[in-house]
Amino acid sequence: MKVLLHLSFVCMLVPALAQRTKLFVAAGQSNAVGMGDSALSKAYATSKTFEYRFTGDSLVKLVDPVGFSELHFEKANTGSTWPAFASAYSSATGDKVIIVQGARGGSSCSKKAELSNYGTWDTTGNLLLFDNAILKIKAAERKAGVKVSGIIWSQGERDANAINTQQLSQEEYGLMLTLLINRFRKALGVQVKFYIIQTGFYIHHPQDGFDKVRAAQEAIAGQIKDVYIVYNQTGGFANKAWMKDDIHYNQAALNDIGKTIAQKIRLVEKKQL
């Protein structure tokens, strides 16, 4: 009887331990890549946070500059939000955290907004990013032995500029983002949670396109299951002196985003436990 009880306990424990690794995808454009300062993010390096590299099929310590020049994705120049996020999430949960970096500066959601070879998440265009993202995510899932826990999306500046120049409408942007979410879920075979860092503003440029992108993101989060805005304070970064330049967030902003979205994602997960 004691042996049976022991085996039963072990069987319960093994699946629990299997959930102790969390895999998150960092996707989007330049603010997802990170244009901050690695010297100000190094404090968030821990022994439980890693990044997956497709080249070499390896897990490496998560330290800035996060990312690797592979599959058309880019490395942070030089600091990103991901060490702060992974550290805060791991501290709150005790979990090992793996980041899959899938971001490229200047990339668009709609092909109508694509610039030259900057890339697009659309189904057609000059430089397509989606298939490479899926390739990298699935390889990371095999390496880690777990399914992806969520996609963290920081993108929209390129499409906002295209709305300002009347190449794109708010409705078209919203449709393309919705289709992208559905494509991720179909390709990954799960109703993966989609976490949006709401797009900020481009200083000294028309605000209308950015307001429309932000409104579309809010609408999608309100309409589609398991889509959440986990950070909505980017619009106030200029007033906090949290901009590195007219469009990119500095490291103070990136660190705040990381810590905040870790808290918000944990709240989402606790509601669904």
Image: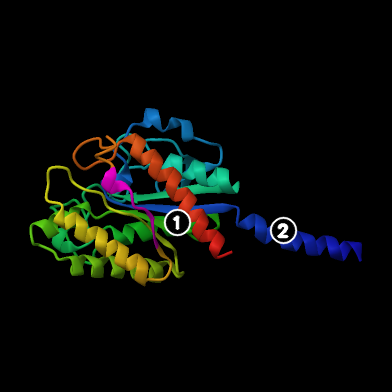
Left or right of 58 in this view: 48: right
- The residue at which mark 1 appears reads as 139
User: Closer to the N terminus: mark 2 or mark 1?
Assistant: 2
Q: Nearer the viewer, residue 105 or 59?
A: 105
In the rendered image, which quarter is residue 25 located in? bottom left
Mark toward the viewer: 2 or 1: 2
Residue 243 appears at what percent x and percent y?
A: 25, 37
Residue type for callout 1? Ala
Residue type for callout 2? Leu
- Residues under labels 2 and 1: Cα distance? 26 Å
Left or right of 153 in this view: 117: left
Q: Nearer the viewer, residue 71 or 102?
A: 102
**The disc label shown at residue 13, or none:** 2
In the rendered image, which quarter is residue 18 located in? bottom right
Residue 44 appears at what percent x and percent y?
A: 47, 35
For the point 53% across and 60% down, which residue is it?
A: 269
Q: Secondary structure at mark 2?
A: helix
Q: Secondary structure at mark 1?
A: helix
Q: Is residue 131 visible?
A: yes
Position above or below: 33 against 40: below
Q: Please state the extent of the stretch shown in magenta in the rendering.
A: 228-236
For the point 35% across and 35% down, which residue is it?
A: 252
> Dot 2 surroundings within 10 Å: few (below 14), some, or many (20 or more)?
few
Q: Quadrant of the N terminus?
A: bottom right
Q: Nearer the viewer, residue 50 or 82?
A: 82
> Dot 1 surroundings within 10 Å: few (below 14), some, or many (20 or more)?
some
For the point 13% across and 60% down, which residue is it?
A: 163
Position above or below: 164 against 169: above
Residue 223 appears at what percent x and percent y?
A: 35, 72
